[in-house]
Image: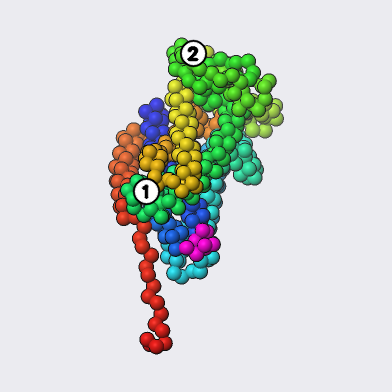
Amino acid sequence: MITEQLVDLSRLQFALTAMYHYLFVPLTLGLSFLLVIMESCYVISGREIYRQMTRFWGKLFGINFAMGVATGITMEFQFGTNWAYYSHYVGDIFGAPLAIEGLMAFFLESTFIGLFFFGWNRLSRLKHLAATFLMALGSNISALWILIANSWMQYPAGSAFNDVTMRMEMTNFWEVVTSPWAQSTFMHTISAGYMTGAIFVISISAYYLLKGNHTELASRSLRIGSIFGLIVTFFTFHMGDESAYLTAQHQPSKLAAMEAMWETHPAPAPLSLFAIPDEEAQCNHAEIRMPALLGLMGTRSLSETLPGISDIIATNEVRIRNGILAVTLLDQLRQDPGNSSLRARFDAVKSDLGYGLLLNRYTSDISTATPEQIKQAARSTIPRVAPMYWSFRLMIGAGCLCLLAFILGCWYSLRGSIPCRKPVLLFIVLCLPMPWIACEIGWFVTEYGRQPWSIYEVLPVHLSVSSLSVGDLWGSLSGFVGLYTLLLIVEIWLMLRTIGHGPAPEPQTAPAPTPAQA
């Protein structure tokens, strides 16, 4: 029997390991292409300062990359250990992108990272630059396949339920890869990673300038990081808008929770700038709205309405009742698979099968679910509003602080006056944690907002977990917390030690003796 505590502990363990792993991913993505830019400057100009910059930031990239690999591998094993039914139900689809990521992208990335570190004196400038570019490309392709898998959980395109095998099966691999969710999520995620790398570079550079250390390297790094960061920040905001549009179209319950929109507003719906959501009374206090903006963002029109929470719950009650019929017909169809009439009736309600499975959390016999249980299941399709509402706004606020840091960095570094602007440098240093806050909260909004589904509208979370004991989960959770805390201490120590030592001076090659000296 699956208990609520078992489900909650399984979710908590995966959330902790995923969010810890994601501390390293965006910095890897961001630093990889900044290294390409810095080394390109070295190849074009021939100035040793750019080579020194590439090698210094490359050391920090290498530390971060190693920690990302160490923490990422354990996550894939959890699908088999903690989410066994999930792996059985959708493994043929979800596993394909992860397998491709391991066979193609990870090996590409790992191979060329070796050439990046050990090929400086063995490869020509152009060949080493090519290796750096392929290392960065591998990092981004690796992210692509992982995000394709995650996006399928949000929008299960290119797949269908097979009532014979009782599993989800892939019907069109190309639809999985080219899903609008996959493309939007990938572009939004990697651009946020580029922002993270840029903030990291300009914050450490600002710290050096405040201390008066390594000023030439810091000034040039801050200029490159600020320009790069400013460009990718606008792209990140644009792709965030695209993600909001897809959420409105395909996950209205998530958008309604993010905006604390209890009732359906006349089109176009207003955007809530500030409110204090009251979930018990299902209303907002002290709300400040911007007219029409949410409707324009969520529908790209002035006439299309966005449903509020109360209307979504009412719609989902209907889908749950259809889901009860789908579960009942599926049981009958398994007993009589050749009955074409049963199959036709089941196909008519098959899309609501997942909604019927939501009732498994409240009753062992779905066909006898009471009206109150149906209402409970319908209410469970809306994530808690307050965490979603405030998390989304905190994410936006952190992103705006990053944008301000890039604008100030660009303005003063291009004018050549950045070393004299102590308050600006201090502000840039203090912005160091902002992209991580935005990234972690962004994933919280994405994943928590999908609840109660592990596969949206297909497989509820409470059916996805393995048949483990609560003691097993407490033991593994404690082990992960202990191990990851140790790894975090090692990561911080290595990073601070490398930053404290600063860039190593380039070795001076002794001039060749003249014929007379020889």
Across and down, in percent, residue 275 comes to: 47, 18
Above or below, 214 relative to 233:
below
Tell me the amino acid under the disc marked 1: Leu
Colour treatment of the image:
rainbow
Quarter of the figure that contains the N terminus: top left
Across and down, in percent, residue 470 comes to: 34, 33
> Which numbered disc, 2 or 1, marks the residue that appears first in the sequence?
1
- Please name the residue shown 30% across and 39% down the image: 478
Which residue position is annotated with label 1?
A: 209
- The verdict on residue 24 being magenta is no
Say if residue 352 shows up in the picture: no
- Please name the residue shown 53% across and 26% down the image: 254
Above or below, 46 relative to 441:
below
Q: Residues within 10 Å of mark 1 (few under 14, many from 20)?
A: many
- The verdict on residue 45 being magenta is yes
User: Which stretch did the figure color magenta?
Assistant: 40-47
Secondary structure type for disc 1: helix
Quadrant position of residue 434: top left
Say if residue 401 shows up in the picture: yes
Which residue position is annotated with label 2?
A: 283
Quadrant position of residue 185: top right
Instruction: Depth check: give the residue in front, 19 or 378.
Output: 19
Instruction: Depth check: give the residue in front, 275 or 377.
Output: 275
Tell me the amino acid under the disc marked 2: Cys
Left or right of 350, for residue 194? left
Left or right of 36, for residue 306? right
Across and down, in percent, residue 182 comes to: 58, 40
Above or below, 466 relative to 505:
above
Check contact, mark 2 vs mark 1: CB within 8 A.
Answer: no
Secondary structure type for disc 2: strand
Q: Main secondary structure of the magenta part?
A: helix
